[in-house]
Amino acid sequence: MSKTTVLAERPGWNGQPKTREARSKRHAFKKYKVLLIMMVPSLLYVIIFNYVPIYGLLIAFEDFQITKGFFGSPWVGLAHFEKAFRDPGFYLVLKNTVLISLYRMVFGFPIPIIFALLLSEVKNVKFKKTVQTASYLPHFISWIILGGIFMSIFSLEGPVNAILGVFGVDPILFMADTSYFRSILVITSILAGFGWSSIIYFAAITGIDPHLHEAAVVDGAGRMKRMIYITIPLLMPVISIMLVLSMSGILDAGFDQIFNMYNPQVYDVADIIDTYVYRKGLIDMDYGYATAVGLFKSLIGLILMLTANGLARRIGGGDYTLW
Amino acid sequence: MVKTESKIADIFLYAIMTAVLVITLYPFWTQVVISLDGGDAANSSFMLFPKSITFDSYKLALDFDALWIGYKNTIIRTCLGVALSILATAITAYPLSKKDLPLNRWITKFMLIQFIIGGGLIPNYLLIKYLGMYNTIWALVIPGMISTFNVLIMRNFFRSLPESLEESAMVDGAGYLKIFIRIILPLSMPIIATEALWVGVGHWNAWFDALIYTNDANKEMLQLVLRRIIIQNNPTQFSEVLTKLQEKSPYSGRQLQATVIMLSILPMLVVYPFLQKYFVKGIMVGAIKG
């Protein structure tokens, strides 16, 4: 076979070597001129609202003063980070953040899976849809309202204290009691989130090839056996991905919820990095320090996500990872 | 043998799921009971049904101006936010739907930054101040207007439309702008409606940005009015209404809070059973890798 035929077989070859690519590029610019102009505002938007704040993270290394501005404030290097690592208050919020989100993960992660497994066994479609729809409801309601409702339920006059009263327990001021507050946060966050988190598992269960189940039935496998040997193994990739995702959120203990439910009496157990950053930054106006703490949080989150993804890849291969 | 076993399992299953149903709905139901009850429910707490039904607290709460201001502001914010967001998303997604658009892959990568890292609270706050958007509605609708996730989903929808439509329009002499407005957008109503709902519910429930970017009673969003009444227990003007109600019942603080909660979630309760499937769809689309 001569060289020319090989070249001619290359897709797009029409006897114009070298300049062809350059020409088609220029041609594409011309052809899409309108669309490229259309993109300009969006690109400017992304630069201003996504990249400028990232650049603004540099104030974590500045003694930022609003009168001097971003460019005029003196550079202090790692001083804010040193201050944070010397501050017992910082370790307290770090501990609270990790504890609350670990509890949420340990108790909250399996519940949507169990819920999806059980509900998908329900055959009455109407009942199934009703339970599903009801379980999504809290997702559509803000934590201001959810927080208000839960605070009312755990209040002195609320039903929880009423039930405990039947057993002779004196009323407990749950929302101001450091020994109960974290548990309440974890329970209510699971209650508000399990339905929505289960969607992804429902989808995975629905996607399982029914032939697998039919074959197992022929072999005499009962429901329980099929769940353990067919459904759960086939769910593993999704479970793994969701675990990776929740790993990266280990420093997200649920700002919306805690900000609306906590009060100064329980700061010792409920103050988390996000609420700390909010108070230091926007209430005390200590911008540089608050940005440093926030940056610390995002970096840890990023590292955790990369690590967890790498681990999942090593254990289970490409199907088990985010990318 | 297997049949009876299966039957027992079924009973067990339905019992658990009924319990789940009750647990998820009960918190909301308590608020219905407390808001409707003549006064006892707010105190003696474990009541499954109101003893007597009165609408006193509803009548009083409806006189509460801040609630109406909040409703008005939230509706304005939601409409404006949805309109801007959809427009911006569509004009970003359409060029990117052309696979041979110059720099396409670079632009997409450039936009993926949103998934990796952001500036966080303080840099964003300062940016809004520097841009002079503080205490204006723009601080609430502009940041977050373009979500890369929504852009990619809309881009994929545009790509799924048959190319022949565009080609034939082009033969007739239409330019890309005309094609986009006359052909692509009308055909994309399903995805536009879906994304409008996502963005809309987000705006309806948003509160933190309003808390930090606005401080004007006339610009207060519904969620913040609720926050003052429900969470902070610190409602100016609210106390007048409360005193009126307290003449009738000593536990009216809780009753009025429950009433306000009901008034604010009623619209959502009515529409969400019909809307939730569009949100579920979003999770599915987002779950597809790559």
Image (tube, coloured by chain):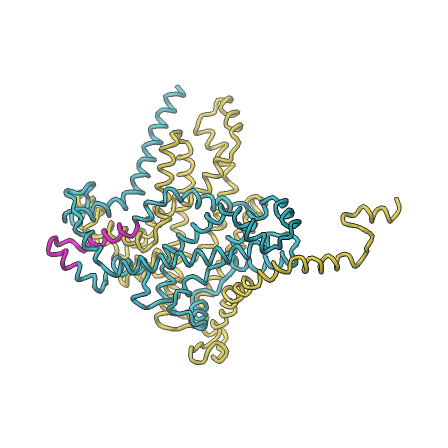
Colour chain B is painted in: cyan
Q: Nearer the viewer, residue B109 or B55?
A: B55
Q: Of residues A92 and B154, which is closer to you in this image? A: B154
The mark total stands at: 0
Q: Residue at x 12, y 53 (%)?
A: B249
Part of the protein shown in magenta: B242-265
Displayed quadrant of residue B26: top left
Identified at 34% across, 55% down, the residue is A257
Q: Does residue B263 show up magenta in the picture?
A: yes
Q: Position of residue A121 (x, y in %)?
A: 41, 31
Name the residue nearer the viewer: A199 or A312.
Answer: A199
**Shown colour of chain A:** yellow
Nearer the observer, A257 or A45: A45
Q: Is residue A29 magenta?
A: no
Residue at 46% over, 50% down:
B195
**Is residue A41 shown left or right of residue A95?**
right
Could one spot residue A178 in this view of the protein?
yes
- Residue B191: percent from left, percent from top: 50, 47
